[in-house]
Every structure is written in C-alpha cells, then in structure tokens.
C-alpha cells in the first residue's frame, strides 16, 4: 500500500478511534493520523499473532476493526503519557 493510502487509512482509523474514545489527548489532526497509522500497525501485529484477517485487503471491515482497536490502545497509552507530563 502506498504512503498516501497509509495516511488516508491512518486518518480514518484515528478519527474512528477518537470518536470512540473522546478526551483531551492534546493532539491535532497530524497526531490523529500518526496514532491511526501506529494503531493500524499494532492491530495488524496483534491480529497476526492471533491468526486473524490475513487476506491482504486493508479496506476489509475486519482489518479496519482490528486497526481501530489497535488505535484505541495506542490512543489510551498516548493519553496516559501526556496526562502524566502535564
């Protein structure tokens, strides 16, 4: 998948995760994209460990769901770290 597709995918996944887990994580849209991309990678890694969703289609609903779960985990960790530093 190209870099632009990763950015768009990260934005979508990060925005969905932010809607599910609102709060003040002190980040703008760039941080949302970065956390979405990292969350997609974390979700993909965990899914790979569990043997889930290895069909190669990133726009599959299962892949998006796993990526959103990963992004929520990353968003939670990021929020905990930024709260501690304030």
Image (cartoon, rainbow, N blue to C red):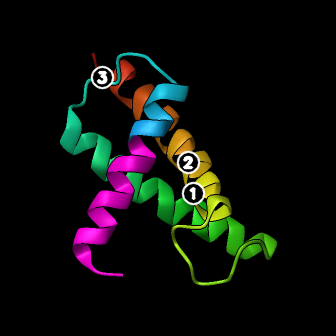
In the image, residue 63 sits, relative to residue 19, either above or below, namely below
Q: Earlier in the sequence, mark 3 or mark 2?
A: 2
Label 1, on which residue?
64
Q: Position of residue 73 (x, y in %)?
A: 57, 42
Q: Residues within 10 Å of mark 1 (few under 14, many from 20)?
A: many
Disc 2 to disc 1: CB gap under 8 Å:
yes
Determine which of the numbered discs, if any, sits on residue 85 in the image. Answer: 3
Determine which of the numbered discs, if any, sits on residue 68 in the image. Answer: 2
Work out whether residue 29 or residue 86 is closer to the camera in this orientation and state it: 29
Q: In the structure shown, which secondary structural element does the residue marked by tag 1 occupy?
A: helix
In the rendered structure, the answer to whether residue 5 lies left or right of residue 49 reads left
Magenta span contains residue 9 = yes
Q: CA distance from mark 3 to mark 2?
A: 25 Å
Q: CA distance from mark 1 to mark 3?
A: 31 Å
Magenta region: which residues?
1-14
Q: Earlier in the sequence, mark 1 or mark 3?
A: 1
Q: Position of residue 78 (x, y in %)?
A: 41, 36
Report how many numbered discs are placed on residues in the image: 3
Q: Residue at x 62, y 46 (%)?
A: 69
Which mark's residue is nearer the viewer, 2 or 1?
1
Q: Residues within 10 Å of mark 3 (few under 14, many from 20)?
A: few
Magenta span contains residue 31 = no
Task: Name the quadrant containing residue 53.
Answer: bottom right
């Amino acid at each position: 998948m190209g870099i632009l597709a990763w950015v768009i995918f990260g934005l979508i996944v990060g925005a969905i995760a932010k809607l599910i887990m609102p709060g003040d994580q002190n980040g703008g849209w760039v941080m949302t994209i970065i956390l979405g991309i990292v969350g997609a990678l974390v979700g993909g890694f965990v899914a790979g460990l569990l043997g889930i969703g290895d069909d190669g289609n990133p726009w599959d609903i299962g892949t998006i769901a796993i990526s959103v779960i990963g992004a929520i985990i990353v968003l939670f960790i990021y929020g905990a770290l930024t709260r501690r530093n304030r």
